[in-house]
Image (cartoon, coloured by chain):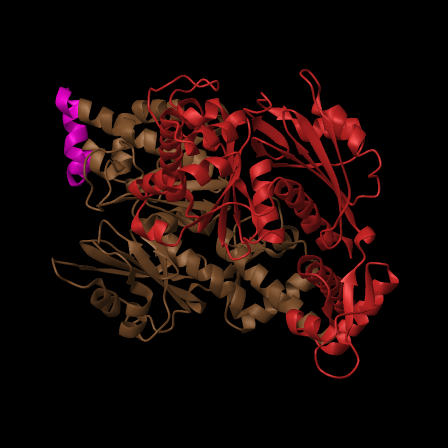
Chain colours: A red, B brown
Amino acid sequence: MARTGTEELRRRNRAALLDQLHRHGPQTRAELTEALGLNRSTIATLAVDLSESGHLQETTGRPTGSAGRPSTLVECVPEAVTVAAVEVRADRVRFGLVGLGGEVLERSEVVLVEGDDPVEAVKKLTGEAAAAVDAVAAVPGLVDSGIVAHSTELGWAGRDFAADLVRATGREWQVVDTATAAAVGEWSRGDAHEATRLLYLHGGRGLTAGLVVEGRAQRGGSIQLGHIVVEPGGRECACGLRGCLEAEMEAFGYAEDIEHATAAASMGDATARDGLRRSGEDLGRALGAVVTATGPDEILFGGWLRELYLSAAAPVRSAIAETTLPHLRSRLRLRTPVLGDEGALMGAAETGFAAALDQMC
Amino acid sequence: MARTGTEELRRRNRAALLDQLHRHGPQTRAELTEALGLNRSTIATLAVDLSESGHLQETTGRPTGSAGRPSTLVECVPEAVTVAAVEVRADRVRFGLVGLGGEVLERSEVVLVEGDDPVEAVKKLTGEAAAAVDAVAAVPGLVDSGIVAHSTELGWAGRDFAADLVRATGREWQVVDTATAAAVGEWSRGDAHEATRLLYLHGGRGLTAGLVVEGRAQRGGSIQLGHIVVEPGGRECACGLRGCLEAEMEAFGYAEDIEHATAAASMGDATARDGLRRSGEDLGRALGAVVTATGPDEILFGGWLRELYLSAAAPVRSAIAETTLPHLRSRLRLRTPVLGDEGALMGAAETGFAAALDQMC
């Protein structure tokens, strides 16, 4: 039993070291000693073990600024562990093969036309990714245990997408929602690392949101933002309810053309300006309820909601202020994501690495 | 290092054994072997260790039904570990000293009159509880890291209640919100153990809610249900916003008299009946947004919302159905709590035990 305990401890230490390098990039042994709270000889043993297994390499790195030899850096071998990530949209499927340390080693996409099944595109894109330790698909919608319960963008309700992918590709898949994946991506590879409770809003052909807590996806954190009812008894929504944000929000009607609308507004077009302002108010009111219910400290406006927010920040902020308690809004930062379209793919990959790094060593 | 690993393993096993008995009550050694996945000799060693330290006792228990000797039961010694739990209300502070296994060993309360500071009441009530390993206070409001950011019932905004309690009593306190505490209580000591994401609604002089995931309180899970805006630009609320559920909901005005209202409604009083129906609709609409944002699988109506729900279940359900997607409501159970007023006190105690059991061994 003592032996089992020690082996378990070594396994955890190896996983912790890989995780540290994967998240924070190349570091010296001294920095790793400090960061992991392990002693120098333990770090040395782990580094040798993991170099022999091909996961790490040690290279002569940056000059230290002081005299003497440049210090040796420990870094990941990207190809040693890879995760296949895909992002499914109505009009295309994007693929990235992401290596240890977060580098994108391969990238490709398949354009979909009406009637195409994304499963075929995923199969084609990931055919060469057999060595990937995990495969993760991001889908815009309400996702729960591999099942896409609702997706405005894809027109799915209750599709067991994980099972469909397993059948087509012969391997296991994790399915996450695009907004949650993008939140994980911005937290781990963007600049939202300070956020404890990060809410990412994704504007595609539907409006979704994802809440991650300290960088981790939450069961139940996949939020159908577009189906928060902002006008009880209001306009009929495609989902069957009335007064959903997606049905009421003016800008939603020209989501594909948001840049045109914001350009018109900035040229002084009163109708466009008014439409954006009202859309900002609708969005802000829906967010008021979401903020009250989930208490985020940062909200990122992604997809086309980025453009809407950039041209209607004032009405969005003022509608949030009218619908949330002072304590909740005093700590709330509103921003746009830095990774843009890459966020969901990076986050899907991180979701795979989180599971893989813990199990592999 | 092997030694450290083994000691750590023993510590964890002791904690797991105590936790098992604390949660599930007396069990035979064979049942413990099965439940914890440890072998018989490990269980035997742990049981002897923990009996010697005074945490457990072994007693001749229930007949097995088959012939032969009745089996020996392992059970907690309640007095070995105690947690002091208080529940603060506008009109009283209730205290319970809860022992290992969940038994309430002492119980008392202090009635507050206008102007009384609950801190003095807590000091008085817990004076005899010096041996308690942890002390937890449940407060109706939005609680974050010991600070009561907002409480309609107590009229507090940004009060560092944890610090006030430390100053008055000379010991550390955890502060949790009443709804979250009650959710933890119903999950661990009531009959809501099946719920993965349990939302407890607390009707006091304000309306609050608490979300617990697999029995555990979440940072950000303390929800100001009463300040979900159900009528944008509607009635002015004491919090400064307009159209909050607390301001709009008719029944909120006679919360203290809800039994009178439900009695009148059941006698055919049309005004009372209509008021309850409209209150149910308002509550249901606010819940629609909360359900969309947090995805619970069970909602418990506690405090005076229990009476409201029992007389207005149909409008509550129908308003939720009008404001949530089918997938979210298909898995949702609506119920009333079984522990009643005891829930918050039991849950506050469990919050203390969760931390204490992990650290003590």
Please determine whether, in this image, residue B102 is positioned above or below residue A177: below
Magenta residues, dominant SS class: helix
Q: Residue at x 56, y 54 (%)?
A: A191
Along the line of sight, which residue is nearer the eye, A76 or A33?
A: A76
- Splitting the image into 4 quarters, where does residue B1 fall? bottom right
Please determine whether, in this image, residue B232 is positioned above or below residue A105: above
A239 is within the stretch colored magenta: no
Please determine whether, in this image, residue A307 is positioned above or below residue A55: above
Query: Is residue B325 among what the camera can see?
Result: no
Q: Residue at x 75, y 26 (%)?
A: A121
**In this picture, which residue range is highlighted in magenta?**
B251-273
Left or right: A252, with A46 as reference point: left
Along the line of sight, which residue is nearer the eye, B43 or B246?
A: B246
Q: Residue at x 45, y 46 (%)?
A: B212
Q: Position of residue A236 (x, y in %)?
A: 41, 16
Q: Position of residue A234 (x, y in %)?
A: 35, 20
**Residue pushed farthest bottom?**
A67
Q: Residue at x 39, y 54 (%)?
A: A331
